Structures are given as structure tokens and as C-alpha cells.
Image (tube, rainbow, N blue to C red):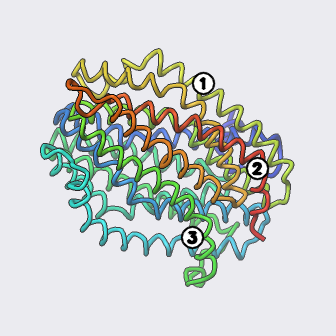
């Protein structure tokens, strides 16, 4: 029994053994961790929805796309670091591995300072530009400002877990995140229900919990010096910083594109009023959980491909890509079935307003089948990124999000305007998203099969 637990939660070397087994072993702890991380925002929504009201729920949801847009630089650094760490770990290159880790931590600190300064000034004007309703704009502003002032915890947690995953360790981040999640839940209830701090209370709880998880990750990394050196000389400017940004920024741009599209669509969502805004918040919270298997398998495929590309075994990369994508798609099929069967019950967790529950459940059914398509997109994009090709997934995201999702949402809204619905049919928000997911899967599969990603490995 002890041996089985150690095998499931131990460090994974993906360059040997059966590919599907290694991918699954790596994915399971990370999936649990991703679900726990999703609880941060979900608990925030549940607490404010239950203790403050539907408008507070709408405020938290309206703020989330903007905050995600501000995080794109950290997404880029994390992805670049994870790719380099996994490839240097696979090739057993201690010197470059050490320099990559040091460079990533320094870049993260600089990015935190930049974001805190720029974001604090830009938050309110951005919310006003998006026509955020007057009833929730003050709550949105305070929520975002507190998250920005505490950005270091979130930033370093994401960077450090990216490094740990590149080293084949997906369990340490899980343990630390579970601790932080429990802390976040306790603080949420304490600050909001106990101290009546409202939206500011959930933001402060999240900041404190994220800082705890980041500190725990630092302690873990300092104990892994059998693989790299944690010395001051590796925390100085070097070419590794440029390489981290070169590899990671396309992924950051991808996240920026997605987040920007969400911000633009949020403006359209705002035009439909508080009820649709709140429904969208609930849907996105459930969507966050539904996407977790896809994101987890995608990240696992990045590490798998990175380690095996570093070892020079492309046949093993292709074999694992096929097996991992199939498992991811089957997992998403199960999730889709659960959403269809239990959607109404899931939505009722967030609010007692029956009309809001019904609206959210109907819209979630539109998206359900799209999760299978996203399993293909995330898995194959993960392989390409792990091999060092971060450009192709970026362009695919640009095409499907900017050229398909946003124009389609606004186009349907315009075409369905009537005297009763002057803003158009709000179904456009979710029909356009489903269309972008399905087309994204088809395009990603085509470029993976084309095989140009094989030429992008580090040398």
C-alpha cells in the first residue's frame, strides 16, 4: 500500500516506462491541485453570493477577466521556465537547469513590481471603459486593487510550481495548495460572514492564502539541490532570462489574447444586465472545474514532451501524445455527462435565486460538448509547447478567439436585436465560445500532425 502511494505521489521521470502510465501518474496529483486552486475563486463566489448578494457575485465575476489579463507576464515566465526545466532535466544539464531557475525567479520579482505600479493606476479606467454597472464598479475596483497589492504570492506560486512540474514533481504543489485552500475557505467565511468585509474580504483571504502556498514552495525547492544549484551567481542577469521570455511570452500572449477577448466579451455581457452577468459568473466557475482535466493533461503533456525531447526520443513523444490525448478526451466525456445530468444542482450552490439557477444551467448545457474538443486542443498544444514550439498554439488561440469568438458573439447579438431584446440574444455569449473551442481542436490537430514542432527543441 505504501509503495503504491509513493508511486502515485512521487517524482516522475517521464523518459522511461509506459507513456500513458507516466502521464496519468503525473496528472492525478496536478488535477487534484488544479481543482483545489479553482476553489479559490469558487469559494469567493459562493461566499459573496450567499452572504452579500447577487450584485456582489457579479462584481467578483466582472473583475476576474481583467485580473487574468494582468497576469499574462507571469503565465509567460511560468511556461518558459517549465519548458526549459523539463528539457534540461531530461538531458541532465545541471548548469543550465540552475541558471534557468535563478533567472525565472528574478524575472518574476521584476514583473511583480511593474504590475503593481501599472495595474493600480489602470484598474478604475479599465472598468469604466467596459461600462461596468455603477452598482458594482466600486466593489470591482476594491477587489482588484487588493489582489494586485498581494500579487507576489500568486506570481511566485505559479512560477515555482512550473519549475517543480518541469522537475517531474507534481505532488508538492498539491500538498501546499491544499493547505492554502483550506486557509482561504476559513478566511473567506471569517472576513465576509464574521467581519462583514464584503468583496474586499474575499480578495484579502485569497492574497494571504496564496502567499502561504508560495512560501511553502520556496522551502521545497531549496531541498531539491541534488538536481540543481541554488546559489547567488545564478540569480544574476544571463541569456537564460531571454530564453525564458522567448519561449514563454507566446504562451503569455495566448493567455493575453484569451483574457482580452474575455474582457471585450465582458463588455457585451455587461450590456445584458446584472442577471446575465451573474449567470456568466456561475457558468465560468463551473467551467473552471470542468476544464481542470483538460488543463492538467495539457500541462502533463508539456512536461512529458519536454523531458523526452530533452532525451532525444521523439518516437516516445508521439506515442505519449496519442495515448495522453485519448485519455484526456475520455475524461472530458465523463465530465460532459455530469454537467448535463447535474447542471441545475451545481448552479444552485451559488445562489438561491431560481431564475438565475435555471438560466445558468441552460447556458452550461450549450458548452458541455465543447470540453471534449478542448481536451484535444490542450493535450496536443501541450506537446508542441513541451517541444519548444510555443508560437503555433499562440496563433491558433489568436485565430479562434479574436477572429472567431469575439466577432461571432457580437454578430449574433446584432442579428438578433428586437424591440423586446434591444441588445440582442444573450445566448450569443456561449454559442460563440462553443464554436471557437470546436474549431480550435480541429486546427490544433492539423498542425500537430504537420510535425513542424519537432524542430523547436533547445540545443
**Residue 457 sits above or below residue 410 on the image:** below
Q: Kindly identify the residue that appears in the image at 39 percent across and 56 percent down.
A: 69
Horizontal and vertical percent for residue 237?
A: 56, 84
Horizontal and vertical percent for residue 428?
A: 38, 32
Q: Kindly identify the residue that appears in the image at 49 percent across and 57 percent down.
A: 158
Is label 2 or label 3 in front?
A: 3
Tell me the element at label 2: loop
> Is residue 259 toward the left or the right of residue 268 in the image?
right
- Other residues around mark 1 within 10 Å, as few (<14) / some (14–19) / many (≥20): some
Q: Which of marks 2 and 3 is nearer the N terminus?
A: 2
> Is residue 78 toward the left or the right of residue 354 in the image?
right
Q: Earlier in the sequence, mark 3 or mark 1?
A: 3
Real-space Cα separation, disc 3 to disc 1, in angstroms: 35 Å
Outermost residue toward the top in this view: 341
Real-space Cα separation, disc 1 to disc 2, in angstroms: 26 Å
> What residue is disc 3 on?
245
> What residue is disc 2 on?
14
- Quadrant in which the N terminus is drawn: top right
Tell me the element at label 1: helix
Real-space Cα separation, disc 2 to disc 3, in angstroms: 25 Å
Q: Earlier in the sequence, mark 1 or mark 2?
A: 2
Q: Which image quadrant is residue 48 in? A: top left
Q: Kindly identify the residue that appears in the image at 46 percent across and 41 percent down.
A: 405
Foreground pick, 229 / 311: 311
The disc at residue 333 is 1
- Other residues around mark 3 within 10 Å, as few (<14) / some (14–19) / many (≥20): many
Amino acid at each position: 500500500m505504501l509503495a503504491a502511494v509513493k508511486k502515485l505521489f512521487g517524482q516522475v521521470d517521464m523518459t522511461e516506462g509506459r507513456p500513458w502510465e507516466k502521464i496519468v501518474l503525473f496528472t492525478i496529483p496536478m488535477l487534484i491541485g488544479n481543482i483545489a486552486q479553482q476553489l479559490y475563486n469558487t469559494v469567493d463566489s459562493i461566499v459573496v453570493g450567499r452572504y452579500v448578494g447577487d450584485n456582489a457575485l457579479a462584481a467578483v465575476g466582472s473583475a476576474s477577466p481583467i485580473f487574468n489579463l494582468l497576469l499574462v507576464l507571469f503565465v509567460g515566465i511560468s511556461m518558459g521556465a517549465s519548458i526549459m526545466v523539463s528539457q534540461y532535466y531530461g538531458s541532465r544539464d545541471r548548469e543550465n537547469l540552475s541558471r534557468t531557475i535563478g533567472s525565472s525567479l528574478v524575472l518574476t520579482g521584476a514583473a511583480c513590481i511593474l504590475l503593481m505600479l501599472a495595474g493600480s493606476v489602470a484598474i478604475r479606467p479599465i472598468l469604466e471603459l467596459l461600462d461596468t454597472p455603477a452598482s458594482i464598479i466600486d466593489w470591482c475596483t476594491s477587489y482588484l486593487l487588493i489582489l494586485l497589492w498581494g500579487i507576489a504570492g500568486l506570481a511566485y506560486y505559479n512560477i515555482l510550481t512550473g519549475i517543480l512540474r518541469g522537475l517531474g514533481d507534481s505532488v508538492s504543489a498539491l500538498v501546499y495548495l491544499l493547505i492554502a485552500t483550506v486557509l482561504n475557505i476559513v478566511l473567506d467565511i471569517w472576513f465576509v460572514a464574521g467581519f462583514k468585509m464584503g468583496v474586499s474580504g474575499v480578495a484579502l483571504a485569497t492574497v494571504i492564502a496564496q502567499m502561504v502556498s508560495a512560501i511553502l514552495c520556496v522551502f521545497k525547492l531549496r531541498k531539491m539541490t541534488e538536481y540543481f544549484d541554488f546559489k547567488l551567481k545564478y540569480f544574476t542577469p544571463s541569456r537564460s532570462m531571454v530564453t525564458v521570455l522567448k519561449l514563454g511570452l507566446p504562451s503569455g500572449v495566448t493567455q493575453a489574447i484569451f483574457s482580452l477577448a474575455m474582457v471585450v466579451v465582458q463588455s457585451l455581457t455587461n450590456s445584458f444586465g446584472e442577471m446575465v452577468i451573474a449567470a456568466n459568473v456561475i457558468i465560468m466557475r463551473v467551467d473552471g472545474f470542468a476544464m481542470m482535466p483538460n488543463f492538467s493533461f495539457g500541462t502533463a503533456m508539456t512536461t512529458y514532451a519536454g523531458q523526452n525531447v530533452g532525451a532525444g526520443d521523439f518516437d516516445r513523444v508521439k506515442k505519449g501524445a496519442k495515448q495522453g490525448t485519448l485519455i484526456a478526451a475520455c475524461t472530458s466525456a465523463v465530465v460532459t455527462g455530469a454537467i448535463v445530468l447535474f447542471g441545475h444542482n451545481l448552479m444552485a450552490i451559488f445562489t438561491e435565486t431560481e431564475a438565475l439557477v435555471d438560466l445558468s444551467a441552460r447556458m452550461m448545457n450549450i458548452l458541455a460538448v465543447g470540453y471534449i474538443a478542448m481536451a484535444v486542443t490542450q493535450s496536443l498544444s501541450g506537446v508542441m509547447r513541451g517541444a519548444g514550439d510555443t508560437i503555433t498554439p499562440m496563433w491558433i488561440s489568436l485565430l479562434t478567439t479574436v477572429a472567431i469568438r469575439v466577432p461571432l458573439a457580437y454578430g449574433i447579438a446584432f442579428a438578433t436585436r428586437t424591440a423586446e431584446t434591444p441588445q440582442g440574444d444573450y445566448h450569443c455569449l456561449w454559442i460563440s465560445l462553443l464554436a471557437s473551442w470546436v474549431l480550435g481542436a480541429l486546427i490544433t490537430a492539423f498542425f500537430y500532425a504537420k510535425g513542424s514542432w519537432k524542430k523547436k527543441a533547445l540545443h
